[in-house]
Image (cartoon, grey):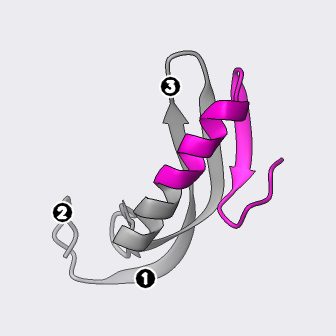
Amino acid sequence: MCFYCKCKTTVPSKTTHVVTLDNCVIVVRNVPCEECELCGEKYYSDEVMEKLDLIITKAKVFASEILVTDYNGKVA
């Protein structure tokens, strides 16, 4: 059930996850999620959250101001 609108239906989707750190922005494209059919709110599984944490941790090493990467490992 959607936390915001209480809709009971979500659909598999992909989204772009953006993290703003002190002096840089990390953009992760094509992140799998469940999307509320009514309001569009996105939800991540525990597995996806763990992988996002790993991607962000690794990206911090390379990022200077902006880093764009793909959930499946492609750096743009």
- Say above or below: 29 vs 35: above
SS for dot 3: loop
**What residue did someone put label 2 on?**
3
Q: Is residue 45 visible?
A: no
Q: Quadrant of residue 35?
A: bottom left
Q: In this image, 41 relative to 7: left or right?
A: right
Q: Residues within 10 Å of mark 1 (few under 14, many from 20)?
A: few
The earlier-in-sequence mark between 2 and 1 is: 2
- Say above or below: 3 vs 25: below
Q: Amino acid at mark 3?
A: Leu
Q: In this image, 11 relative to 8: left or right?
A: right
Where's residue 20, x and y in %?
Answer: 51, 29
Q: Amino acid at mark 1?
A: Val
**What residue did someone put label 1 on?**
11
Where's residue 7, x and y in %?
Answer: 21, 75
SS for dot 1: strand
The earlier-in-sequence mark between 1 and 3 is: 1
Q: Amino acid at mark 2?
A: Phe
- Say above or below: 43 vs 26: below
Where's residue 66, x and y in %?
Answer: 71, 28
**What residue did someone put label 3 on?**
21
* Marks 2 & 1, CB-CB < 8 Å contact: no
- Say above or below: 8 vs 68: below
Question: Which residue occupies 29% across, 83% down?
Answer: 9
Residues rendered magenta in the picture: 53-76
SS for dot 2: loop
Where's residue 57, x and y in %?
Answer: 54, 42
Question: Which residue occupies 56% across, 61% down?
Answer: 15
Question: Which residue occupies 43% across, 82% down?
Answer: 11
Q: CA distance from mark 2 to mark 3?
A: 26 Å
Image quadrant in which the N terminus is located? bottom left
